[in-house]
Image (tube, coloured by chain):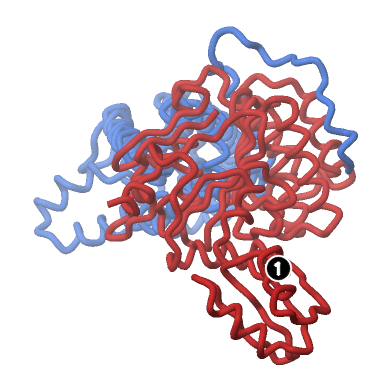
Chain colours: A blue, B red
Amino acid sequence: MSAATITNTPDTTPRSGHYKFSGLLGSEWTKLRTVRSTMWTLGLTILIAVVISAVATAATRANWSTTTLANRAGFDPIGRTLIGVFFGTFTIGVLGVLVVSAEYGTGTIHAVFCAAPRRLRVLAAKTIVFGAVALVISEIASFASFFLGEAFLTGPVPHATITSPGALRAVAGSGLYLCAIGLFGLGLASIIRHTAGAISAFAGILLLIPIIGAALPASLDNDLTRFMPLRIGEEMVSGPPLANSFSPWTGLAVLCAYVAALLIIGAVVLVKRDA
Amino acid sequence: MIEAKNLTKRYGGTLAVDDLSFTVRPGLVTGFLGPNGSGKSTTMRLIMGLDAPNHGDVTVNGHHVHDMSWPLHEVGALLESRSIHPGRSARGHLQMLAQTNSIPRARVDEVVEMTGLTSVSRRRAGKFSLGMTQRLGMAAALLGDPDVLLCDEPVNGLDPDGVRWVRNLLKSLAREGRTVFVSSHLMAEMALTADEVIIIGKGRLIVQLPITELLARSSKRSVRVRSPQVGQLKTALEELDGVTATLEADNSLTVRGTDEVTIAELAASLPVTVYELAPQSESLEEVFMELTEGTVEYSAARPAESPAAKEAGQ
Protein backbone atom coordinates (compact mmCIF):
# COMPACT_ATOMS: atom_id res chain seq x y z
CA MET A 1 0.00 0.00 0.00
CA SER A 2 1.77 3.12 -1.14
CA ALA A 3 1.10 6.45 -2.77
CA ALA A 4 2.52 5.12 -6.01
CA THR A 5 -0.47 2.82 -6.51
CA ILE A 6 -2.98 5.63 -6.76
CA THR A 7 -2.76 6.00 -10.53
CA ASN A 8 -6.09 5.42 -12.16
CA THR A 9 -6.64 3.21 -15.16
CA PRO A 10 -8.42 4.65 -18.18
CA ASP A 11 -11.91 5.54 -17.17
CA THR A 12 -14.36 2.86 -18.20
CA THR A 13 -17.34 4.25 -16.36
CA PRO A 14 -20.06 5.33 -18.76
CA ARG A 15 -20.49 9.08 -18.83
CA SER A 16 -23.77 9.29 -20.71
CA GLY A 17 -27.21 8.27 -19.51
CA HIS A 18 -28.09 7.40 -15.95
CA TYR A 19 -27.27 4.53 -13.64
CA LYS A 20 -29.37 1.63 -14.75
CA PHE A 21 -32.11 -0.40 -13.15
CA SER A 22 -30.46 -3.55 -14.51
CA GLY A 23 -27.38 -2.60 -12.50
CA LEU A 24 -29.51 -2.37 -9.36
CA LEU A 25 -30.99 -5.80 -10.09
CA GLY A 26 -27.47 -7.22 -10.48
CA SER A 27 -26.40 -5.53 -7.26
CA GLU A 28 -29.34 -6.99 -5.32
CA TRP A 29 -28.53 -10.46 -6.65
CA THR A 30 -24.90 -10.03 -5.58
CA LYS A 31 -26.08 -8.93 -2.13
CA LEU A 32 -28.24 -12.02 -1.77
CA ARG A 33 -25.65 -14.51 -2.91
CA THR A 34 -22.68 -13.03 -1.01
CA VAL A 35 -24.15 -13.44 2.46
CA ARG A 36 -23.84 -17.02 3.51
CA SER A 37 -26.73 -17.01 5.98
CA THR A 38 -29.10 -15.99 3.18
CA MET A 39 -28.10 -18.96 1.08
CA TRP A 40 -28.39 -21.23 4.14
CA THR A 41 -31.88 -20.00 4.89
CA LEU A 42 -32.99 -20.54 1.31
CA GLY A 43 -31.57 -24.05 1.37
CA LEU A 44 -33.19 -24.65 4.74
CA THR A 45 -36.59 -23.67 3.35
CA ILE A 46 -36.35 -26.45 0.77
CA LEU A 47 -34.88 -28.92 3.24
CA ILE A 48 -37.55 -28.34 5.90
CA ALA A 49 -40.33 -28.65 3.33
CA VAL A 50 -39.01 -31.88 1.87
CA VAL A 51 -38.07 -33.53 5.16
CA ILE A 52 -41.37 -32.73 6.87
CA SER A 53 -43.30 -33.92 3.82
CA ALA A 54 -41.32 -37.15 3.74
CA VAL A 55 -41.81 -37.77 7.47
CA ALA A 56 -45.53 -36.90 7.36
CA THR A 57 -46.30 -39.12 4.39
CA ALA A 58 -44.17 -42.00 5.64
CA ALA A 59 -46.00 -41.83 8.98
CA THR A 60 -49.34 -41.81 7.19
CA ARG A 61 -48.36 -44.88 5.22
CA ALA A 62 -47.08 -46.70 8.31
CA ASN A 63 -50.20 -45.97 10.39
CA TRP A 64 -52.76 -46.47 7.66
CA SER A 65 -53.93 -49.87 8.89
CA THR A 66 -54.86 -48.38 12.27
CA THR A 67 -56.39 -45.16 10.87
CA THR A 68 -60.13 -44.85 11.47
CA LEU A 69 -62.49 -45.05 8.52
CA ALA A 70 -63.59 -41.44 9.07
CA ASN A 71 -60.02 -40.22 8.96
CA ARG A 72 -59.33 -42.36 5.90
CA ALA A 73 -62.30 -40.80 4.15
CA GLY A 74 -61.13 -37.29 5.00
CA PHE A 75 -57.52 -37.92 4.01
CA ASP A 76 -56.11 -35.36 1.60
CA PRO A 77 -53.15 -36.87 -0.29
CA ILE A 78 -52.26 -33.49 -1.79
CA GLY A 79 -52.28 -31.42 1.38
CA ARG A 80 -50.35 -34.05 3.33
CA THR A 81 -47.36 -33.83 0.99
CA LEU A 82 -47.33 -30.04 1.12
CA ILE A 83 -47.48 -29.70 4.90
CA GLY A 84 -43.72 -29.03 5.01
CA VAL A 85 -44.04 -26.22 2.50
CA PHE A 86 -46.44 -24.57 4.93
CA PHE A 87 -43.67 -24.64 7.57
CA GLY A 88 -41.43 -22.76 5.16
CA THR A 89 -43.63 -19.74 5.96
CA PHE A 90 -41.32 -18.88 8.81
CA THR A 91 -37.93 -19.33 7.18
CA ILE A 92 -38.86 -17.43 4.06
CA GLY A 93 -40.69 -14.72 5.99
CA VAL A 94 -37.72 -14.15 8.27
CA LEU A 95 -35.44 -14.05 5.25
CA GLY A 96 -37.67 -11.43 3.67
CA VAL A 97 -37.32 -9.36 6.84
CA LEU A 98 -33.54 -9.83 6.94
CA VAL A 99 -32.78 -8.78 3.37
CA VAL A 100 -34.03 -5.32 4.35
CA SER A 101 -33.38 -5.04 8.09
CA ALA A 102 -29.79 -6.34 7.88
CA GLU A 103 -28.97 -3.49 5.53
CA TYR A 104 -30.20 -0.98 8.07
CA GLY A 105 -28.60 -2.83 10.97
CA THR A 106 -25.16 -2.92 9.36
CA GLY A 107 -25.34 0.50 7.72
CA THR A 108 -24.95 -1.07 4.28
CA ILE A 109 -28.01 0.91 3.28
CA HIS A 110 -25.95 4.13 3.51
CA ALA A 111 -23.38 2.88 1.03
CA VAL A 112 -26.18 1.68 -1.24
CA PHE A 113 -28.09 4.97 -1.13
CA CYS A 114 -24.88 6.94 -1.78
CA ALA A 115 -24.34 4.80 -4.89
CA ALA A 116 -28.00 4.72 -5.92
CA PRO A 117 -29.75 7.66 -4.25
CA ARG A 118 -33.16 7.08 -5.86
CA ARG A 119 -34.45 4.97 -3.06
CA LEU A 120 -37.63 3.69 -4.67
CA ARG A 121 -35.62 2.11 -7.46
CA VAL A 122 -33.55 0.29 -4.86
CA LEU A 123 -36.67 -0.97 -3.10
CA ALA A 124 -38.17 -2.03 -6.44
CA ALA A 125 -34.99 -3.86 -7.46
CA LYS A 126 -34.81 -5.59 -4.09
CA THR A 127 -38.46 -6.61 -4.24
CA ILE A 128 -38.09 -8.03 -7.74
CA VAL A 129 -34.84 -9.91 -7.08
CA PHE A 130 -35.86 -11.30 -3.70
CA GLY A 131 -39.34 -12.09 -5.03
CA ALA A 132 -37.89 -14.00 -7.99
CA VAL A 133 -35.42 -15.93 -5.83
CA ALA A 134 -38.11 -16.68 -3.24
CA LEU A 135 -40.46 -17.88 -5.98
CA VAL A 136 -37.90 -20.26 -7.48
CA ILE A 137 -36.96 -21.64 -4.05
CA SER A 138 -40.61 -21.95 -3.01
CA GLU A 139 -41.62 -23.74 -6.18
CA ILE A 140 -38.67 -26.13 -5.87
CA ALA A 141 -39.74 -26.81 -2.28
CA SER A 142 -43.37 -27.39 -3.31
CA PHE A 143 -42.75 -29.64 -6.28
CA ALA A 144 -40.00 -31.62 -4.52
CA SER A 145 -42.23 -32.10 -1.47
CA PHE A 146 -45.16 -33.19 -3.59
CA PHE A 147 -43.30 -35.74 -5.68
CA LEU A 148 -41.32 -37.12 -2.75
CA GLY A 149 -44.43 -37.24 -0.55
CA GLU A 150 -46.50 -38.99 -3.17
CA ALA A 151 -43.74 -41.59 -3.54
CA PHE A 152 -44.30 -42.49 0.13
CA LEU A 153 -48.07 -42.77 -0.27
CA THR A 154 -48.24 -46.28 -1.65
CA GLY A 155 -50.44 -49.35 -1.43
CA PRO A 156 -53.85 -48.81 0.11
CA VAL A 157 -53.17 -45.12 0.91
CA PRO A 158 -54.87 -42.73 -1.50
CA HIS A 159 -52.37 -41.27 -3.87
CA ALA A 160 -52.39 -38.18 -6.08
CA THR A 161 -50.49 -37.27 -9.20
CA ILE A 162 -49.77 -33.81 -10.50
CA THR A 163 -52.69 -34.30 -12.93
CA SER A 164 -55.16 -35.14 -10.13
CA PRO A 165 -57.91 -32.52 -9.70
CA GLY A 166 -56.55 -29.59 -7.71
CA ALA A 167 -53.02 -30.98 -7.45
CA LEU A 168 -51.22 -28.63 -9.80
CA ARG A 169 -53.11 -25.68 -8.29
CA ALA A 170 -52.10 -26.73 -4.76
CA VAL A 171 -48.46 -27.39 -5.61
CA ALA A 172 -47.78 -24.35 -7.79
CA GLY A 173 -50.02 -22.20 -5.58
CA SER A 174 -48.10 -23.19 -2.43
CA GLY A 175 -44.95 -21.89 -4.04
CA LEU A 176 -46.72 -18.64 -4.86
CA TYR A 177 -48.02 -18.43 -1.31
CA LEU A 178 -44.52 -18.85 0.15
CA CYS A 179 -43.10 -16.25 -2.20
CA ALA A 180 -45.83 -13.81 -1.14
CA ILE A 181 -45.01 -14.49 2.52
CA GLY A 182 -41.35 -13.68 1.82
CA LEU A 183 -42.40 -10.37 0.29
CA PHE A 184 -44.72 -9.82 3.26
CA GLY A 185 -41.62 -9.97 5.49
CA LEU A 186 -39.72 -7.69 3.15
CA GLY A 187 -42.53 -5.13 3.13
CA LEU A 188 -42.85 -5.26 6.91
CA ALA A 189 -39.10 -4.69 7.37
CA SER A 190 -39.09 -1.78 4.96
CA ILE A 191 -41.45 -0.07 7.41
CA ILE A 192 -39.99 -1.28 10.72
CA ARG A 193 -36.28 -1.52 9.69
CA HIS A 194 -35.08 -3.17 12.90
CA THR A 195 -34.55 -6.92 12.64
CA ALA A 196 -35.93 -7.83 16.04
CA GLY A 197 -38.92 -5.52 15.71
CA ALA A 198 -39.79 -6.67 12.21
CA ILE A 199 -39.48 -10.37 13.06
CA SER A 200 -41.63 -9.85 16.16
CA ALA A 201 -44.22 -8.05 14.05
CA PHE A 202 -44.13 -10.83 11.47
CA ALA A 203 -44.62 -13.55 14.07
CA GLY A 204 -47.20 -11.45 15.90
CA ILE A 205 -49.33 -10.88 12.82
CA LEU A 206 -49.18 -14.50 11.71
CA LEU A 207 -49.55 -16.25 15.07
CA LEU A 208 -51.03 -13.90 17.65
CA ILE A 209 -53.88 -12.35 15.67
CA PRO A 210 -55.46 -15.79 14.98
CA ILE A 211 -55.21 -16.56 18.73
CA ILE A 212 -56.92 -13.29 19.59
CA GLY A 213 -59.52 -14.11 16.93
CA ALA A 214 -60.22 -17.42 18.61
CA ALA A 215 -61.33 -15.51 21.72
CA LEU A 216 -64.02 -13.71 19.74
CA PRO A 217 -67.57 -15.08 19.20
CA ALA A 218 -67.40 -17.94 16.72
CA SER A 219 -69.36 -16.20 13.98
CA LEU A 220 -67.04 -13.19 14.05
CA ASP A 221 -63.96 -15.41 14.29
CA ASN A 222 -65.07 -17.41 11.26
CA ASP A 223 -65.40 -14.23 9.26
CA LEU A 224 -61.96 -13.04 10.34
CA THR A 225 -60.13 -16.34 9.97
CA ARG A 226 -60.24 -16.29 6.20
CA PHE A 227 -58.23 -13.08 6.18
CA MET A 228 -55.33 -14.59 8.14
CA PRO A 229 -52.16 -15.22 6.11
CA LEU A 230 -51.66 -18.66 7.62
CA ARG A 231 -55.27 -19.60 6.82
CA ILE A 232 -54.70 -18.52 3.26
CA GLY A 233 -51.66 -20.80 3.19
CA GLU A 234 -53.62 -23.71 4.68
CA GLU A 235 -56.27 -23.28 2.05
CA MET A 236 -53.68 -23.20 -0.71
CA VAL A 237 -51.91 -26.43 0.32
CA SER A 238 -55.18 -28.27 0.82
CA GLY A 239 -56.63 -30.38 -2.01
CA PRO A 240 -60.31 -30.01 -1.09
CA PRO A 241 -61.68 -26.60 -0.01
CA LEU A 242 -61.67 -25.73 3.71
CA ALA A 243 -64.50 -24.20 5.71
CA ASN A 244 -64.35 -20.47 6.59
CA SER A 245 -61.88 -19.76 3.82
CA PHE A 246 -61.62 -17.88 0.61
CA SER A 247 -61.04 -19.91 -2.51
CA PRO A 248 -57.28 -20.52 -2.94
CA TRP A 249 -56.83 -17.86 -5.61
CA THR A 250 -58.96 -15.28 -3.82
CA GLY A 251 -56.91 -15.96 -0.70
CA LEU A 252 -53.68 -15.45 -2.60
CA ALA A 253 -55.04 -12.19 -4.01
CA VAL A 254 -55.84 -11.02 -0.46
CA LEU A 255 -52.32 -11.91 0.65
CA CYS A 256 -50.88 -10.05 -2.34
CA ALA A 257 -53.00 -7.05 -1.38
CA TYR A 258 -51.39 -7.11 2.09
CA VAL A 259 -47.96 -7.26 0.48
CA ALA A 260 -48.81 -4.37 -1.83
CA ALA A 261 -50.10 -2.29 1.09
CA LEU A 262 -46.93 -2.96 3.12
CA LEU A 263 -44.69 -2.12 0.17
CA ILE A 264 -46.57 1.10 -0.53
CA ILE A 265 -46.27 2.21 3.10
CA GLY A 266 -42.62 1.07 3.04
CA ALA A 267 -41.99 3.14 -0.09
CA VAL A 268 -43.58 6.22 1.43
CA VAL A 269 -41.55 6.06 4.65
CA LEU A 270 -38.41 5.22 2.67
CA VAL A 271 -38.66 8.51 0.82
CA LYS A 272 -39.79 10.57 3.81
CA ARG A 273 -37.53 9.28 6.53
CA ASP A 274 -33.79 9.81 6.92
CA ALA A 275 -31.83 6.72 5.93
CA MET B 1 -16.91 21.73 -5.10
CA ILE B 2 -19.27 21.33 -2.18
CA GLU B 3 -21.51 24.25 -1.28
CA ALA B 4 -23.57 24.30 1.90
CA LYS B 5 -25.98 27.14 2.50
CA ASN B 6 -27.65 27.67 5.85
CA LEU B 7 -27.78 23.93 6.53
CA THR B 8 -29.87 23.14 9.57
CA LYS B 9 -30.70 19.70 10.91
CA ARG B 10 -32.68 18.93 14.02
CA TYR B 11 -33.10 15.47 15.53
CA GLY B 12 -35.98 15.62 17.94
CA GLY B 13 -35.07 18.48 20.24
CA THR B 14 -31.37 18.43 19.41
CA LEU B 15 -29.97 20.91 16.94
CA ALA B 16 -27.19 18.89 15.28
CA VAL B 17 -26.34 21.35 12.51
CA ASP B 18 -27.19 25.00 12.95
CA ASP B 19 -27.33 27.37 9.98
CA LEU B 20 -24.05 26.05 8.58
CA SER B 21 -22.66 27.59 5.38
CA PHE B 22 -19.33 26.77 3.76
CA THR B 23 -17.68 26.05 0.45
CA VAL B 24 -15.24 23.21 -0.17
CA ARG B 25 -13.12 23.99 -3.21
CA PRO B 26 -11.55 21.56 -5.67
CA GLY B 27 -7.80 21.01 -5.76
CA LEU B 28 -7.44 21.23 -2.00
CA VAL B 29 -7.74 18.95 0.95
CA THR B 30 -10.28 20.61 3.19
CA GLY B 31 -10.28 19.47 6.78
CA PHE B 32 -13.57 19.45 8.66
CA LEU B 33 -12.80 19.87 12.31
CA GLY B 34 -14.82 19.89 15.44
CA PRO B 35 -15.09 18.06 18.74
CA ASN B 36 -17.03 14.80 18.86
CA GLY B 37 -20.72 15.51 18.55
CA SER B 38 -20.22 18.87 16.86
CA GLY B 39 -22.21 17.84 13.77
CA LYS B 40 -19.48 16.68 11.37
CA SER B 41 -21.02 13.29 10.60
CA THR B 42 -24.49 14.80 10.33
CA THR B 43 -23.16 17.32 7.81
CA MET B 44 -21.60 14.48 5.81
CA ARG B 45 -24.95 12.67 5.80
CA LEU B 46 -26.72 15.83 4.67
CA ILE B 47 -24.22 16.25 1.82
CA MET B 48 -24.84 12.68 0.69
CA GLY B 49 -28.60 13.12 0.87
CA LEU B 50 -29.02 10.36 3.46
CA ASP B 51 -30.70 12.81 5.80
CA ALA B 52 -32.81 15.73 4.66
CA PRO B 53 -32.03 19.15 6.16
CA ASN B 54 -34.80 20.98 8.03
CA HIS B 55 -33.57 24.13 6.39
CA GLY B 56 -30.93 25.16 3.88
CA ASP B 57 -29.34 23.28 1.04
CA VAL B 58 -26.15 21.53 0.04
CA THR B 59 -24.89 20.67 -3.44
CA VAL B 60 -21.94 18.74 -4.82
CA ASN B 61 -20.62 20.21 -8.07
CA GLY B 62 -23.90 22.09 -8.29
CA HIS B 63 -26.13 19.03 -7.96
CA HIS B 64 -27.93 17.21 -5.23
CA VAL B 65 -26.58 13.68 -4.89
CA HIS B 66 -30.12 12.46 -5.51
CA ASP B 67 -30.08 13.90 -9.05
CA MET B 68 -26.69 12.56 -10.13
CA SER B 69 -26.51 10.36 -13.19
CA TRP B 70 -23.60 8.23 -11.97
CA PRO B 71 -23.33 9.01 -8.26
CA LEU B 72 -20.28 6.86 -7.49
CA HIS B 73 -18.43 8.56 -10.30
CA GLU B 74 -19.23 12.02 -9.00
CA VAL B 75 -18.85 11.62 -5.27
CA GLY B 76 -17.32 8.88 -3.14
CA ALA B 77 -17.96 8.73 0.57
CA LEU B 78 -16.44 6.99 3.53
CA LEU B 79 -19.17 7.42 6.12
CA GLU B 80 -19.19 7.13 9.87
CA SER B 81 -21.26 3.96 9.88
CA ARG B 82 -18.72 2.24 7.60
CA SER B 83 -21.74 0.66 5.92
CA ILE B 84 -20.42 -2.88 5.65
CA HIS B 85 -22.31 -6.15 6.24
CA PRO B 86 -20.09 -8.34 8.45
CA GLY B 87 -21.20 -11.48 6.65
CA ARG B 88 -20.17 -10.29 3.23
CA SER B 89 -16.66 -10.49 1.80
CA ALA B 90 -14.79 -7.31 0.95
CA ARG B 91 -15.02 -8.22 -2.71
CA GLY B 92 -18.75 -8.94 -2.44
CA HIS B 93 -19.31 -5.57 -0.82
CA LEU B 94 -17.38 -3.72 -3.51
CA GLN B 95 -18.93 -5.79 -6.29
CA MET B 96 -22.51 -5.04 -5.24
CA LEU B 97 -21.70 -1.32 -5.07
CA ALA B 98 -19.87 -1.39 -8.41
CA GLN B 99 -22.85 -2.98 -10.14
CA THR B 100 -25.20 -0.16 -9.16
CA ASN B 101 -23.14 2.24 -11.30
CA SER B 102 -22.10 -0.23 -14.01
CA ILE B 103 -18.49 -0.11 -12.83
CA PRO B 104 -16.47 -2.97 -14.37
CA ARG B 105 -15.09 -5.78 -12.25
CA ALA B 106 -11.56 -4.76 -13.18
CA ARG B 107 -12.02 -1.57 -11.19
CA VAL B 108 -13.02 -3.63 -8.14
CA ASP B 109 -9.75 -5.56 -8.45
CA GLU B 110 -7.92 -2.27 -8.81
CA VAL B 111 -9.29 -0.63 -5.64
CA VAL B 112 -8.75 -3.87 -3.73
CA GLU B 113 -5.10 -3.79 -4.72
CA MET B 114 -4.81 -0.05 -4.18
CA THR B 115 -6.02 -0.34 -0.59
CA GLY B 116 -3.86 -3.34 0.18
CA LEU B 117 -6.77 -5.74 0.69
CA THR B 118 -5.81 -8.30 -1.97
CA SER B 119 -4.94 -11.08 0.47
CA VAL B 120 -8.12 -10.67 2.53
CA SER B 121 -10.62 -9.65 -0.15
CA ARG B 122 -12.51 -12.94 -0.02
CA ARG B 123 -12.71 -13.00 3.75
CA ARG B 124 -15.82 -11.85 5.53
CA ALA B 125 -15.65 -8.20 6.51
CA GLY B 126 -16.85 -9.06 10.02
CA LYS B 127 -13.45 -10.66 10.70
CA PHE B 128 -11.60 -7.50 9.69
CA SER B 129 -9.62 -5.31 12.07
CA LEU B 130 -10.64 -1.68 12.41
CA GLY B 131 -7.80 -0.69 10.09
CA MET B 132 -8.82 -3.19 7.42
CA THR B 133 -12.43 -2.02 7.70
CA GLN B 134 -11.24 1.54 7.11
CA ARG B 135 -9.33 0.44 4.04
CA LEU B 136 -12.38 -1.33 2.70
CA GLY B 137 -14.40 1.84 3.28
CA MET B 138 -11.77 3.82 1.36
CA ALA B 139 -11.86 1.25 -1.44
CA ALA B 140 -15.63 1.68 -1.69
CA ALA B 141 -15.30 5.47 -1.74
CA LEU B 142 -12.73 5.30 -4.56
CA LEU B 143 -14.66 2.74 -6.60
CA GLY B 144 -16.16 5.22 -9.06
CA ASP B 145 -12.94 7.26 -9.36
CA PRO B 146 -14.98 10.21 -8.06
CA ASP B 147 -14.40 13.92 -8.58
CA VAL B 148 -15.40 14.62 -5.00
CA LEU B 149 -14.31 12.55 -2.02
CA LEU B 150 -15.87 12.72 1.43
CA CYS B 151 -14.15 10.94 4.30
CA ASP B 152 -15.49 10.85 7.83
CA GLU B 153 -12.58 10.24 10.21
CA PRO B 154 -10.59 8.17 7.71
CA VAL B 155 -7.53 7.57 9.90
CA ASN B 156 -9.40 6.20 12.92
CA GLY B 157 -7.96 2.83 13.79
CA LEU B 158 -5.20 2.91 11.20
CA ASP B 159 -1.59 2.06 12.03
CA PRO B 160 1.08 4.72 11.30
CA ASP B 161 1.70 3.23 7.87
CA GLY B 162 -2.01 3.40 7.07
CA VAL B 163 -2.28 6.96 8.38
CA ARG B 164 0.54 8.03 6.08
CA TRP B 165 -1.07 6.19 3.19
CA VAL B 166 -4.41 7.98 3.70
CA ARG B 167 -2.64 11.32 4.04
CA ASN B 168 -0.70 10.86 0.79
CA LEU B 169 -3.74 9.50 -1.00
CA LEU B 170 -5.91 12.47 -0.05
CA LYS B 171 -3.20 14.94 -1.02
CA SER B 172 -2.55 13.32 -4.37
CA LEU B 173 -6.28 13.18 -5.16
CA ALA B 174 -6.51 16.89 -4.39
CA ARG B 175 -3.49 17.59 -6.60
CA GLU B 176 -5.36 15.94 -9.46
CA GLY B 177 -7.93 18.70 -9.08
CA ARG B 178 -10.49 16.76 -7.06
CA THR B 179 -12.44 18.07 -4.12
CA VAL B 180 -11.37 16.31 -0.92
CA PHE B 181 -13.37 16.88 2.25
CA VAL B 182 -12.15 15.04 5.29
CA SER B 183 -13.44 15.24 8.82
CA SER B 184 -11.40 14.73 11.94
CA HIS B 185 -11.35 15.61 15.58
CA LEU B 186 -7.54 15.58 15.49
CA MET B 187 -6.09 18.96 14.67
CA ALA B 188 -2.54 17.57 14.45
CA GLU B 189 -3.54 15.14 11.71
CA MET B 190 -5.28 17.89 9.78
CA ALA B 191 -2.22 20.12 10.06
CA LEU B 192 -0.31 17.49 8.09
CA THR B 193 -3.05 16.74 5.56
CA ALA B 194 -5.29 19.72 5.00
CA ASP B 195 -4.71 22.86 2.97
CA GLU B 196 -7.73 24.52 4.42
CA VAL B 197 -9.87 23.86 7.48
CA ILE B 198 -13.49 24.37 8.37
CA ILE B 199 -13.98 24.32 12.12
CA ILE B 200 -17.38 23.81 13.64
CA GLY B 201 -18.66 23.62 17.18
CA LYS B 202 -22.16 22.71 18.33
CA GLY B 203 -23.25 22.55 14.70
CA ARG B 204 -22.21 26.11 13.93
CA LEU B 205 -19.39 27.38 11.78
CA ILE B 206 -16.56 28.80 13.87
CA VAL B 207 -14.08 29.57 11.13
CA GLN B 208 -12.97 28.57 7.65
CA LEU B 209 -9.38 29.45 6.75
CA PRO B 210 -6.12 28.12 5.29
CA ILE B 211 -4.29 25.92 7.75
CA THR B 212 -1.25 28.24 7.60
CA GLU B 213 -3.36 31.12 8.82
CA LEU B 214 -4.63 29.19 11.75
CA LEU B 215 -1.50 29.58 13.83
CA ALA B 216 -1.04 33.18 12.81
CA ARG B 217 -4.55 33.85 14.03
CA SER B 218 -3.84 32.65 17.48
CA SER B 219 -4.03 35.64 19.82
CA LYS B 220 -1.86 33.95 22.36
CA ARG B 221 1.52 33.72 20.69
CA SER B 222 4.14 34.03 23.38
CA VAL B 223 7.87 34.56 23.80
CA ARG B 224 9.95 32.69 26.30
CA VAL B 225 12.63 34.84 27.91
CA ARG B 226 15.51 33.78 30.16
CA SER B 227 17.47 36.44 31.95
CA PRO B 228 19.50 36.83 35.21
CA GLN B 229 17.54 40.05 35.88
CA VAL B 230 14.15 38.54 35.31
CA GLY B 231 12.34 40.68 37.88
CA GLN B 232 13.52 43.96 36.41
CA LEU B 233 12.57 42.86 32.90
CA LYS B 234 9.14 41.70 34.06
CA THR B 235 8.35 45.06 35.62
CA ALA B 236 9.47 46.94 32.52
CA LEU B 237 7.48 44.66 30.19
CA GLU B 238 4.30 45.03 32.18
CA GLU B 239 4.45 48.78 31.79
CA LEU B 240 3.87 48.26 28.05
CA ASP B 241 0.28 48.32 26.81
CA GLY B 242 -1.45 44.94 26.61
CA VAL B 243 1.61 42.94 27.53
CA THR B 244 1.61 40.24 30.18
CA ALA B 245 4.67 38.53 31.58
CA THR B 246 4.37 35.40 33.67
CA LEU B 247 7.18 34.04 35.77
CA GLU B 248 7.45 30.31 35.17
CA ALA B 249 8.66 27.66 37.61
CA ASP B 250 12.05 27.43 35.87
CA ASN B 251 12.56 31.17 36.43
CA SER B 252 11.88 32.00 32.78
CA LEU B 253 9.31 34.54 31.62
CA THR B 254 6.41 33.82 29.29
CA VAL B 255 5.58 37.08 27.58
CA ARG B 256 2.36 37.62 25.66
CA GLY B 257 1.06 40.58 23.69
CA THR B 258 4.29 41.59 22.05
CA ASP B 259 7.03 40.09 19.90
CA GLU B 260 10.68 39.14 20.38
CA VAL B 261 11.94 42.31 18.62
CA THR B 262 10.23 44.63 21.09
CA ILE B 263 11.46 42.58 24.04
CA ALA B 264 15.06 42.58 22.77
CA GLU B 265 15.01 46.34 22.26
CA LEU B 266 13.51 46.93 25.67
CA ALA B 267 16.12 44.68 27.29
CA ALA B 268 18.95 46.51 25.53
CA SER B 269 17.64 49.89 26.62
CA LEU B 270 17.45 48.95 30.30
CA PRO B 271 20.03 47.33 29.98
CA VAL B 272 19.24 43.74 30.95
CA THR B 273 21.17 40.64 29.92
CA VAL B 274 19.10 38.13 27.97
CA TYR B 275 20.18 34.50 27.61
CA GLU B 276 17.31 33.28 25.55
CA LEU B 277 14.52 34.87 23.54
CA ALA B 278 12.37 32.15 21.98
CA PRO B 279 9.07 32.80 20.18
CA GLN B 280 6.64 30.02 21.10
CA SER B 281 3.84 29.07 18.82
CA GLU B 282 0.95 27.36 20.46
CA SER B 283 0.28 23.84 19.30
CA LEU B 284 -2.55 23.47 16.86
CA GLU B 285 -4.36 21.37 19.43
CA GLU B 286 -4.32 24.31 21.83
CA VAL B 287 -5.62 26.65 19.16
CA PHE B 288 -8.30 24.14 18.30
CA MET B 289 -9.37 23.70 21.91
CA GLU B 290 -9.51 27.42 22.35
CA LEU B 291 -11.62 27.90 19.23
CA THR B 292 -14.08 25.17 19.98
CA GLU B 293 -14.49 26.12 23.60
CA GLY B 294 -16.19 29.20 22.25
CA THR B 295 -14.16 31.30 24.67
CA VAL B 296 -12.52 33.30 21.91
CA GLU B 297 -14.48 34.90 19.16
CA TYR B 298 -12.95 34.89 15.74
CA SER B 299 -13.99 36.70 12.66
CA ALA B 300 -14.34 34.24 9.82
CA ALA B 301 -12.11 34.17 6.77
CA ARG B 302 -15.15 34.93 4.65
CA PRO B 303 -17.41 37.06 6.80
CA ALA B 304 -20.26 37.09 4.27
CA GLU B 305 -20.59 33.32 4.58
CA SER B 306 -20.13 33.00 8.27
CA PRO B 307 -23.00 33.29 10.68
CA ALA B 308 -20.50 33.25 13.54
CA ALA B 309 -18.85 36.34 12.12
CA LYS B 310 -22.18 38.07 11.69
CA GLU B 311 -22.99 37.43 15.28
CA ALA B 312 -19.58 38.63 16.41
CA GLY B 313 -20.12 41.86 14.53
CA GLN B 314 -23.47 42.61 16.09
Q: Nearer the viewer, residue B134 or B206?
A: B206
Rendered view: A213 above or below A27 = below
Q: Nearer the viewer, residue A170 or B152?
A: B152
Is residue A225 found left or right of B213 in the rendered image? left
Q: How many marks?
A: 1
Mark 1 residue type:
Glu
Q: Is residue A57 visible?
A: no
Rendered view: A1 above or below B80 = above
Residue at image coords 57%, 20%: B70
Q: Quadrant of residue B274?
A: bottom right
Q: Is residue A194 visible?
A: yes
Q: Which residue is mark 1?
A: B265
- Residue B63 in the image, given as x and y percentages of width and height: 46, 22
- Residue A46 in the image, given as x and y percentages of width and height: 60, 42
Residue at image coords 80%, 15%: A10
- Residue B225 in the image, given as x and y percentages of width and height: 73, 78
Rendered view: A199 above or below B229 = above
Q: Nearer the viewer, residue B270 or B118?
A: B270
The chain letter for the residue carrying disc 1 is B
Residue at image coords 41%, 54%: B203
Residue at image coords 75%, 16%: A11
Q: Quadrant of residue A154?
A: top right
- Residue B308 in the image, given as x and y percentages of width and height: 38, 51
